[in-house]
Amino acid sequence: MGNPVLFFEILATDQTKVQDFYSDLFGWNINRDNPNKYGFVNTNSEKGIQGGIGHAELTGQNKVMVYVEVDNLDAYIEKAKALGGKLIMPPTVLIGYSIAMVSDPEGNITGLILPQRPNSKQ
């Protein structure tokens, strides 16, 4: 089984401006009806993946990230470290999935996502 990209994320210091830019450019519906005004993107397409546009509050740097599905967060974190990467964010449980973030040897960050399944411990 391969590891598909499940989600993209665009982080910006002015998230509203960037949300409006992509909405106008591509016709994306962006739902920012939440306390942080994080924009959940619906690309209005049956192809591709959905994503989000949020504030670059952790690093203060604009960036684009992808989240790749894995079957074991800890195993992929250890593999990334063995290949010269670093753990950026430890596994965090969210509604419906767990995520972690690792960097490659050049500092590019990739999210690891583990969809929660019934009776899943991770």
Image (cartoon, helix red, strand yellow):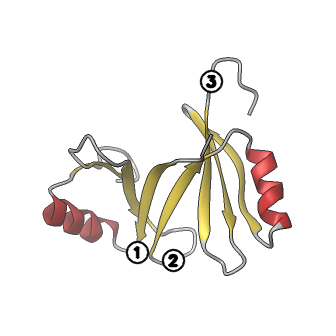
Q: Nearer the viewer, residue 13 or 72?
A: 72
Residue 63 location, x and y as percent?
46, 73
Q: Quadrant of residue 8?
A: bottom left
Q: How far apart in space, not on screen, are marks 1 and 3 (Cα)? A: 34 Å
- Say whether marks 1 and 2 touch (CB < 8 Å): yes
Looking at the rendered structure, the kind of residue marked 1 is: Thr
Residue 93 location, x and y as percent?
65, 39
Image point (82%, 65%), residue name: 81
- Say whether marks 2 and 3 touch (CB < 8 Å): no
Question: Which disc number belongs to residue 13?
Answer: 1
Image point (53%, 47%), residue name: 4
In this rendering, the answer to whether 99 lies above or below 21 is above
Q: How far apart in space, not on screen, are marks 1 and 2 (Cα)? A: 6 Å
Q: Nearer the viewer, residue 54 or 22?
A: 22
Q: Residue furthest front?
A: 1
Residue 29 location, x and y as percent?
20, 49
Q: Which residue is mark 3?
A: 117
In this rendering, the answer to whether 84 lies above or below 8 is below
Looking at the rendered structure, the kind of residue marked 3 is: Arg
Image point (77%, 68%), residue name: 86
Sooner in the amino-acid sequence: mark 1 or mark 3: 1
Q: Quadrant of residue 27?
A: bottom left
Image point (21%, 69%), residue name: 21
Say few, some or many: other residues with alpha carbon within 10 Å of mark 2 (under 14 / 14 to 19 / 20 or more): few
Q: Name the secondary structure under disc 2.
A: loop
Q: How far apart in space, not on screen, are marks 2 and 3 (Cα)? A: 34 Å
Question: Which disc number belongs to residue 44?
Answer: none
Sooner in the amino-acid sequence: mark 2 or mark 3: 2
Q: Which residue is mark 2?
A: 60
Sooner in the amino-acid sequence: mark 1 or mark 2: 1
